[in-house]
Amino acid sequence: MALEKIGLLAETSWEVCNKIGGIYTVLSTKAKVLQQAYGDNLVFIGPDVWSVETPSPSFKETKSLFNNFSKREIAEFGIKVRCGRWNIPGSPQVILVDFQGVYSHLDSIFGKMWELFGVDSMREYGDYREGCAFAVAAAVVVKLLAEHLGVKEKSVFAHFNEWTTGMGLLYLQMIMPKAATLFTTHATSIGRSICGNGKPLYDYFDGYNGDQMALELNMEAKHSLEKKAAWNADCFTAVSEITAREAEKLLEIRPQEVTPNGFEPGFVPGDKKYKSLRKKGRARILEIASRLKGRKFSDDTMIVATSGRNEYRNKGLDLYLDSLAELKKLNPKKDVVALVLVPAWVAYPEPSLMSVKQQCEINNPVSGPQTDFITHILHNMDSDSVTRRIQSLEWEKKLGERVSVIFIPCYLNGEDGIVEISYYDILPAIDITVFPSYYEPWGYTPLESIAFGIPTITSDKSGFGQWVLSESANSISESGVRVVERTDSNYAQAAGKIAAQLYDFARFSESKIAEASEAAYKMAEKADWKYFIKFYHEAFSIAKKRRDSRLKK
């Protein structure tokens, strides 16, 4: 799609300037190459969920942007906007939308969406109204911004991400029918729910019906909205072939384009900084491990980690922990500190890990840790799945002196009170990562890992894992990636294979580790956004052709 044919490219997501999940990484790493292709015709639209007391750390307001669009009075629904730049590579333009005024109009909007598109919002609950209120407000902003800038309606391309913005796509087609619309599912709502409820997705995949499962799992509104957005988008895309097949089965429509997630190499520090971060990060991790476990860990300790969203089964946290128990049986030849870097319901930092000053500030000086495996005490220690499994493994004596698990249950933003190092800055300290997901439409965490030169173990149930298998050898030494097969019936075997790979890696010489790291870098280079962005250009072309066909009917 040539640049001159797009007068306004608006991409809407709940995670614009709002880091809560993997879609933030998709958008923030993709922005630079989109910016290079479409310049300031590109604008991201996100929710204004911030306040003076808690401002967005990645948004810099510039009121004069878009010819002072933020000063324009938007009478419809009482919507307010702030314009600025997203503090990421490319510094793209952003509009944050205050959508509170939409709530009082939602019932009538839901009625209109049922009448025009068949969206069934009758049994909505949870965050459904919030997502719809923001999405509708975003659609209104797209239309008014185009009018404000004098952009012709047919040169407007509006891209909506995930079910949370689906109502915006449909609403925009109602108020601005000549705009070309795109909708991307990063994980179908019903597929994620099937897995999250412990049901076997793969052995019975051919027997599932999306509508039936939505009724059973109380997902009717979200599923209906996602399905109708996919059906009515001028171009429907999915982030991997595995998700495309899932959409074809559960949403009953095959995406017109698969748009795999790339990575922006600008996020990776240069060699000098990388070495500094590695030294600092390893010292901090080993200090924490030593204080929790009551013994010193040597500099050659192998640091293993998993990270991401806290979905115990979907993200393979259960399999990761059980593979560590299997690793203990193999008796590795060096100490292993295995990190679980996933956010949980934090109450307060483990007091014994605080400085004396911090302990005095909370008036709770202590002489020893309350636990020996967690850096932050949780509100729900007795019910948290990760905590309970670690305690169970320790009680069963399956984890010995050589394998130590440390749970860091907070967002690593540099302000957690214990680690005080952000995720990307702690990543260089890790030797190998493990992401054995059961349900993973793409899988940014293993891609980030190899982009930093850190070998990774992932599963063939991730879009990333399947992409690796299609592109390279399934080998830590040759590609920096080991893809482990997962089914609904091979859990124990998968745990054993992960443990065996970790055991082998612990015996790697320095030269072989360097070889694996170089292989990881080279594999990550193949996923650079400069190569993957072509799929988006094709999606825009498809959207234009299908929009033109739609308007002729």
Image: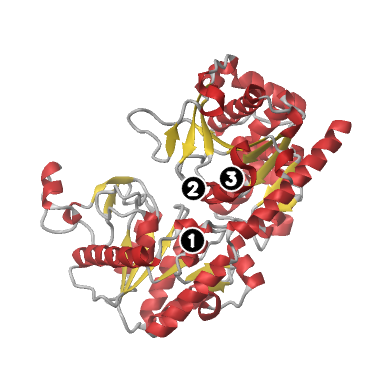
Q: Residue at x 53, y 76 (%)?
A: 493
Task: Residue type at mark 1: give it.
Answer: Glu
Residue at which label 2 appears: 21
Sequence-first tag of 2 and 1? 2
Residue at which label 1 appears: 448
Measured Cα–Cα span from mark 2 to mark 3: 22 Å
Sequence-first tag of 3 and 1? 3
Q: Residue at x 35, y 28 (%)?
A: 52
SS for callout 2 = loop
* 538 on left or right of 126: right
Q: Quadrant of residue 392?
A: bottom left
Judge whether 519 appears above or below 408 on screen: below
Which numbered marker is on residue 35? 3
Measured Cα–Cα span from mark 3 to mark 1: 21 Å
SS for callout 3 = helix
Q: Residue at x 71, y 56 (%)?
A: 245
